[in-house]
Amino acid sequence: MPVAIEARGLVKRYGEFAAVDGLSVAVDEGEVLGFLGPNGAGKTTSIRMLAGLTRPSAGEVWIQGKRVDGDGRARRGLVGLCPQNLVVWEHLTCTENLLFLADMYAVRRRESVKSARALIERLHLDERADILAGKLSGGMKRRLNLALALIHDPPIIVLDEPSAGLDPQSRIVVHDFIQDLGATQGKTVILTTHEMDVADRLSKRVAIIDRGKLRVIDSPERLKNTVGEGDTVVLRLKDAGRAEEAARAAAAVEGVRGAVAVSREVRFQSLNAVARLREVYGALEKLGIEVEDASMRKNTLEDVFIQLTGRALREEAVQ
Amino acid sequence: MKALRVSVKAYKEFPRDRRALAFLLLFPVIFVLVFGSATFGVGQLTAPHAVALINEDEGAWILNNTTLEFHNFGEEFIGVMENSTYENSTTPVFLVTKVNRSEADKRIASRNLSAIVTIPPNFSGGVRAQINQTIYTTVSTALVRAVAAGNFTGGNTTGFGNYTLPTLEANVTATVVIEGDFTYSEFATSQAYVQGFVDGFVGAVTAIATDEVLKRLPPPLQQEVDTGSHIDARTYGVPGTEEFQVFDWMAPGLFVFATILVALAVTVWVAREVEGGNLERLKLSRMTTADFLVGLLVPWASLGALQVVLLFATSLLMGFSWQGGAGALLLAVGIGTLSATASVALGLLLVSFVKSERQATSIGPLIIIPIAFLTEAFFPISFTPLVEGSPWGQAVRAMRGMLTFGLPAGDIAQAVGWMAVQTAILFAVAVVVFRRTRLVAE
């Protein structure tokens, strides 16, 4: 798959402080890339440089195989940005907002009207299409905010926390829409979010950035299987008196960590626990210990995220 | 095309943003209503009075004993005025400017002068008539007294000198014309001082002539007599101002003041777009700097035109007596549009340095209101470069000259020309600064 947008060694310094420090990441055409990081990690600065709103201190941005200059002129129309803040023209209606921005992208009126209608319908804004944006609810404004990033049909879309603060219904609408962008429309999407489950579900790959540096980039599945404490397994034994013995047997299996006995249960952690369970069961069988029930909490992307970025509040750390 | 869309967007937003519209249209109307029903005028007792002197005196030949001398008493009168100071003070009574009539009219219109004093062609003739009248009256009165006292016998005049009585010029009267704006309190003071100086000059001439005669008469016959006057001064309003009220002077300034407020509105408006991120959204689009600026300029400048029309109508309701007809009104709308254009430029310049709507509303007035006061919209400014250095000052002068004083278009062309040049420079600077700070990547 050809690369749609690529950052090569991007650096942004503010005095001595490097907000982004040598970021290199390539996003394929049609890929949804989850771009994660704690507050102040450099996500927004990175996507502003990719979009052309912030001039890098060093490094390059390549779009569709061409290097683009710092002030973003060369990428005009290629990148659609949905900013974190609600950026709408409050004194224009939803439709007027979309048509005005389409005009600024020199989209033909017939096409822009069609696109505006489709976006309004797809994002469930039809009943409010002719209401001033300033009178919309927060959720509707956020959906309009998203629609504005797409009105000119850009091949690359950067979404900065597009579903922040939305109610569950609106989140479903927005998430389905984003999923559709990558899967059906073949758009390249860079998605920043603090909702790890959303990134896990929507992203083909996830990049985690911290203190301006890229910590890891891989598929969510692989990250969950390779980073962190792993899945948590709980085995309930028939015989409570053998829990300590069972815990020792489990701990002896390679890849199993933190095996403990708690009442009738044995708990342990392991990366890719499903693959380890067979060996643990085998070890218990050899000892004649019977398992009455088993449950597993899969390693989550949030676990991966915490493992890589730590538990400290990041705003304090940045200070 | 994109510029047009930006303009159309603004036109749609104007009526929907009622606060901003009220600020721009209602606030100036309130100003007009307040000033229209108020009086105005302050002055200092010992401040110099700026007057223009136009000397049309042709001079006159005067026989001094046996010598015929040519005098231009107009020049001497000007010298007296120039060198006079207030009692026990070094402050001059007058700041005398010698200009032509057209320039004097313009300065009266801008209140840089309080009065135009015109010395008539027969001023020296009037002085000569005054001298002759004094000699004739004094001598003939003495003669009558001599006869009565028995000193006159058979055609000889004992004790009288040997000279011929001058010819009387009974029909000669030289009138010094003092012109100004009756609505300007400073004119009232200035014309009173000039009138006093004319009377004083006549008195001095009469006294010198009387002294010259009396010292040749025997002491019993030395008596001053009332000789009348061949020189007087009359006060007139500058054409068109005779029926003026203070508000007539002020109204055109208020029109321009309203267009200056456009700068504040533009600053707040664009600051809101910056703070809200809308401008960044546009930066990502294919919109160019020119699209944005032209798109911004057209609606705001046309709002300036609307302000002038609206305030003109309100002023008429308040009794504004204007001059110049439809052509002048049309030109005033044009000046208002140009003034609003300069205000858009100022707004762009200000918004280059503010980051939020709150900053715009707090910092903007600190810059814009003093500028408004330095335009002579509300009161005359003695340091004229401050006024002439800004397009709004030129706008006030042009609009006032035309609507209040009825100056023809040719007389305000220079002010309008300067205004256009100043606006163009301001706009060019604003475009460069605004583009660098707001329309390129950070």
Image: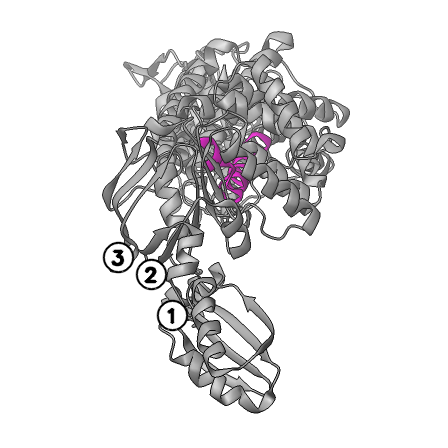
Q: Residue at x 39, y 37 (%)?
A: A51
Q: Is residue B280 magenta?
A: yes
Q: Is residue A66 left or right of residue B274?
A: left
**Residue under pointer 3:** A15
Q: Is residue A61 left or right of residue B92?
A: left
Image depth: mark 3 or mark 2 in front: 2
Q: Nearer the viewer, residue B397 or B202?
A: B397
Q: What's the distance in space between the residues labelled 1 and 3, CA to CA?
A: 18 Å
Mark 1 surroundings: few (<14), some (14-19) or many (≥20) residues within 10 A: few
* Secondary structure at numbered mark 2: loop
Whichever of labels 1 and 2 marks the residue nearer the N terminus, that label is 2
Tell me, for residue B323, which label it has, or none.
none
Q: Residue at x 51, y 56 (%)?
A: A196
How is the rendered protein coloured?
A: one colour
User: Could you tell me if the residues under marks 1 and 3 are in contact, i.e. CB atoms within 8 Å?
Assistant: no
Q: Is residue B95 left or right of residue B70?
A: right
The amino acid on which the numbered mark 3 sits, given as a three-letter code, is Gly
- Where's residue B421, x and y in %? 37, 21
Q: Quadrant of residue B325?
A: top right
Q: What's the distance in space between the residues labelled 3 and 2, CA to CA?
A: 15 Å
Mark 3 surroundings: few (<14), some (14-19) or many (≥20) residues within 10 A: few
Question: Which residues lie in the magenta part?
Answer: B257-282
Tell me which chain the residue with mark 1 is part of: A
Tell me, for residue A211, which label it has, or none.
2
User: Could you tell me if the residues under marks 1 and 2 are in contact, i.e. CB atoms within 8 Å?
Assistant: yes
Q: What's the distance in space between the residues labelled 1 and 2, CA to CA?
A: 9 Å
The amino acid on which the numbered mark 1 sits, given as a three-letter code, is Ala
Provide the major secondary structure of the magenta segment. Answer: helix
The amino acid on which the numbered mark 2 sits, given as a three-letter code, is Arg
Whichever of labels 3 and 2 marks the residue nearer the N terminus, that label is 3
